[in-house]
Structure formats: structure tokens, C-alpha cells
Image (cartoon, rainbow, N blue to C red):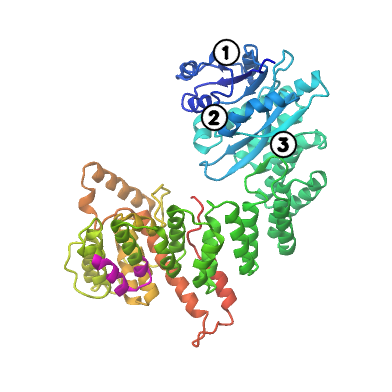
Amino acid sequence: MRAERISLCMIVKDEEELLPHCLASVQGAVDEMIVVDTGSTDRSAEIAKQYGAVVVAFEWCEDFAAARNAGLERASGDWILFLDADEALDRAAREQIRSWTAVSGCDGLFLNIHNYTGTGQQGVTVNPVLRLFRNAPSHRFEGRIHEQIAAAICRINPEAAFHVTDMVIHHYGYQTAIVERKDKVNRNVRLLQQAVEEEPDQPFHHYNLGVEYLRVGEAERALETFGVARMGIDPAVTSYAHLLFKYEVRCLQHLNRWQEALDRIDAALELFPEYTDLMHHRGVCADALGDADRAEYSLREAVRMGPPPPIYHTEEGIGTYQTWYTLGRLLEGRADLEGAVDAYVEAVRTKSSLLPPLYRIFRIMRVSGQEHQIPELVKECFALVSEEATHKVLGILEQSRCYDAALQLLPDVSSQPTGEMRERLSVAEAMLQIQQGRWNKARLKLEPVQRKKGLLAISSARWLERLEWIEGKEVNGDDPLALWLKRSSQVGAAVTNDEESTVQTGRTVGLRVAKKKDMNSSMDVTVAGAEYDGWQALGLMMEGCVQSGRWKELHSLIQMCRQQLAGAGLLVGESGRVEEKEKEMEGKKENGKAGDMESFPGASDTLTGTSWLVKGLVSAADHHLEVFAQHADGQRHRCWPVVQHIRLELPGADGFES
């Protein structure tokens, strides 16, 4: 029997950046490639030919179906696989696809589209879509945009059969950078509005138009458009009905119309009782309405249901880690901290790369006085199978201010440390001791590293000089930060509390939005043995002053940092001054003079400086709250639950990308 052939059919325009990845993903999985080019001005056609594709020139006529069908006319395979340039066939699917077509008695096969949105790191939505179908002259696409093939197949054969496979297509086209560059939303809205004018009674057009409105945050307009679509469909037979209901719920949530959203969910669950996404959102809505019992029941029910059947559009983690994390936040708000930790642990077990639950676990255990149990919890519940995983957990512990727990786990970073790694671990331990204000212990770790004259000798010597300043001793070295501390503290001693012309307490800080390097964790750079920027070092020192009760030194550090920021033009009321200062800085950088004006390494990075200063203030507030919540004999104060809740809600790293 002749093996059935597969034809890839695509339409492209100016896709030279993404097209190679797409075509490489199908090599060996298809027998021919037909690429319809709708007017590219870049190398798209040339790239397609390099991969062995037949390129069909097509004059764009504002009709995606017409362009798709031009490719079908040239396809000779028994099956048609259609992709877009911003998609790629998963490696496993590439190996499975011929088996599916060989044994399938179906007319078409659904593949799961994994849509990556935002920066591509926020998780994925999963949508089963008909992407593989038998090639026949009567099988032609319909629809100006969001073109469909199923209607034509079913029109010819009302008994046509389709199967949902576990094959995956990765779709990157709705990542923010690609959407903005290609202006996809405006193009889609324009074509869909035209389609609505041509076929006003076609609910699918209204549905897709609502999706575009929702994508750009026009929830009211989207809700109205979804309503028109819903009035025109029979939910029992419409493939996208479940998603239409969910999108209406999302609109209502966006508009804070929580009761309406809850009512819509309950109605939709009558039609789609297996749709976990609705049950999850039921918990979210009930929580927003203050019905914590119903919210908890719904979220636990969603976890019990697990991910929905493959016929439903869903979001990665619904019924698993997303739902566990949402449940954890709910239980945390109900002061059920033990239950919250259990939920967060389940979230991490479901997806080991998930960071936010770890931040919540460690913060809860620290605030509730259970930090000493963290090492045991980590070893029992999480499989730290690599040094990288241990390193990541150590960084989160440090950012959560669980320094003793980090110290206990630090030896696990390397099972057979080299001499250099032992020095790095010594410096890492010193940093953890510094953040706890244990200056002598830090010194004992740094001095041997300095004496060995290795890669970390200079940085260790500089830290020893900073400890000299903290302890009130004479600073005689050449560390720029230590010298700045010495000079600034001498100048600051002559400044009275009445002189507020430079730094004014409570003044609004105006910040320009700028993308900066990640400065959340010092553990990462410590174990790597890198130099600290000055602001990061000052943050560690402020933390140590808080932990050791050196309030005079803390106050001095805060005042000096504020004066440095004011001198950089940040702590001023007029944003124009900030912009002038930044322009001045850029000019000096171009002329190679930026280093001349920096008081210490990184001093000109005012956004980082503000971040570390705020962290120091938050740490101090957290410490005072901790002390307040205890009686002199160590017993908990009657207000302890309230204070604990406040401490849990203080600003801090949370593991979410900004």
C-alpha cells in the first residue's frame, strides 16, 4: 500500500525572521511545502526556496481564505497540514504525524496550539484546532479572516469524523514584540469589521472581533460583541461556545462585575460541566465577592477535576499549578497559613520551575516563626537534583530574608567543590552573615579568601574595608565604596536635622520607567564570585544593620543614600530635572567620563539605588513589626495575627517577572 503523503501549506508576507524556524520544524514530517507569498519585500520567498518549498506568488486581496486556497490548488499530498510562519511543529509531533495519518480513518485531525503571549514567559494557552485534513477539491477554506475548513468538509460529508490528537504546534505570534511590530490587532479588527459588514448574521465574525477587543483591554466593547455572537449560536453544537462564555466572564471580571460573572459561570457550567477553567474562575469570582467558603470549594473542585478534556481551550496550569497557587493565596488571606503552604507545595510539585509559590512558602514560614523547618521541607518536598536548582532555592531564600535556612543549605551547592568553589561558598556565606549583622562571622569567612590571593581576594578585601566602616573603625584601604562611606559620614556629621534643602522626608519620588538589570538577588552574584555594584552592597549592609540593631549606622546609611540619590537628580519634585540629569549622564558616558563622576561603583544607577533603599526600609519595618508582635518574655502579642498579616503583605520579591 502506498504511504500517504503530507503537504505543508502556508501563506507568508515579510516573515524572514520567523520562517526558518517554522520550516525547519517540519523537515522530515512532510513530503512537500507550498508557500504562498502575498507580497513580501524581504527574503521570505528566497528562504522558502532554500528549504525546498514551492513558492506561489499571490496578490493580496484582504482575504486569508483566498490566499490559503491558492496554496491548496498546488498541493499534491493526501493530507494538508497548514501552519503560519510564527508557528513551529513540536519535535514529538514531527515524529508522530505520519503515524496519525496512517492509522486515522478521520477526515481531519486537531492539533493543540500552544499560544505564547506577553514576553513568552507567562505560560501558555492551549487551544485544539483543526490543522490536518484530507486533501480534496471540495475542501476549501472559508472566511476573510480566521478562515475555517471544517464547514466545507462537513458540507460535503455530514458524517465526517474528526479526532483530537496530542500533537502540539507552538505559536509565538502573539508575543508582545511581534504583535507590536506587525500591528496585528489593528489589521485583524479592520478585516473583522469588514467581514461583519459583509455577513452580519455570522456569529463567528462577532466572536473573533470580541477577542480582538478583549486583547487590547476594551472589555465593555468586547462584552457587547460577544453578546451578539452568543445570541446567534447554539451552544450545544458550536465548537467555540465554551470559549465564548469564558471570554464573557473575563470581560465581566475586568469590569469588576463579579456577581454577573459568577452568574454567567454557573449558567455555562450547566452546558460544560467538565470545563475546569469555568470552575477555577468561579473560585476567583466568589473570592472577590467575599464568599471565601464557596471560593475554596470551587478551587478545590477545579483541582479535583484537573485539566479539562482536550476538546476545550484552556490555560496551562488550570486545574493544576495555577489553581493550587490561587488556592494558596486564598488560604493565606484566611490566615490558614499551614493550608496555604500545602497548596503552594503542590503548585511547585506540579511545575518545578515555578517560583512564586516558593517565595510565598519561605515568607510565610519566616513570618510565622518556622524558618528552622525550611531546610527539612525543601529536602522532603522538592527534588533538588542539580546544583543549579539548589542555587535557585538559595537565591529565593535570601530574597525572602531566610538567611539561616540558606546557610544550612549552602553546602549542598556543590557535592565535590574545587578550591575555587570553596572560596566562592565562603564569600557567599559571608554575604549571608553580613545580611544578618554577624560582622565577625563574615570577617572569619572573608579573611582566609583574601589571604589566598585568588580570584575573590580583591572583592573580599573590599568587603573587609566596608566592615571596618560599619564597626566604627578607621578605613584605610582603596575600596571606592568604603571611601565614599567614610567621606559621606564625615560630611553628614556636620548636617543638622533642620537642613532639608537636599533631602526632604516624605517627598514624592518621580521615576521614569526604564528596563534595568535584575538586582533582586545577591546570592546569584555571590556564588558566581562577581563584584557587587555599590547599591547592592549598601542594601546588604542596611539589612545587616537592621538584623543586628545598629540603628545609628542604619540611619547614616539611609541618609547618605538619599543624599546620593538627590545629588543624582532623582529625589526632586520636577520630572524635568530627572530627565536633564539622565541626559547629562548619557553625554558623559559617550565621552568616557561616566566613571569620573561615580562616587562608588554603580552610583549613577539611581533606579537600582532607589530599589535597594526601599528594600532596606521595608526590612526595618518588618523587623519592628516582628518585635512589636512579641511580649518581653517572648510570648506573642494579642495583635500578632494582624501584625503577621501586615508583614506578609509588605513589598518584596515575588518571583513574577516585571
Give the amino acid at mark 2.
Asp
Label 2 sits on residue: 86
Q: Earlier in the sequence, mark 2 or mark 1?
A: 1
Residue 601: image quadrant is bottom left
Mark 3 to mark 1: distance in Å?
32 Å
Label 1: how many Cα within 10 Å (few below 14, some 14–19, many 20+): few
Q: Which mark is residue 225?
A: 3
Do we see residue 347 in this rendering? yes
- Tally of numbered discs: 3
Dot label at residue 59: 1
- The three-letter code of the residue at mark 3 reads Thr
Quarter placement of the N terminus: top right
Look at 52% across and 57% down and name the residue there: 383
Say whether residue 9 is left or right of residue 647. right
Q: Residues within 10 Å of mark 3 (few under 14, many from 20)?
A: many
Image height of 518 relative to 113, above or below: below
User: Considering the numbered disc 1 on the image, is that residue within a helix, a strand or a loop?
Assistant: loop
Mark 3 or 1, which is nearer the eye? 1
**Does residue 60 belong to the magenta stretch?**
no
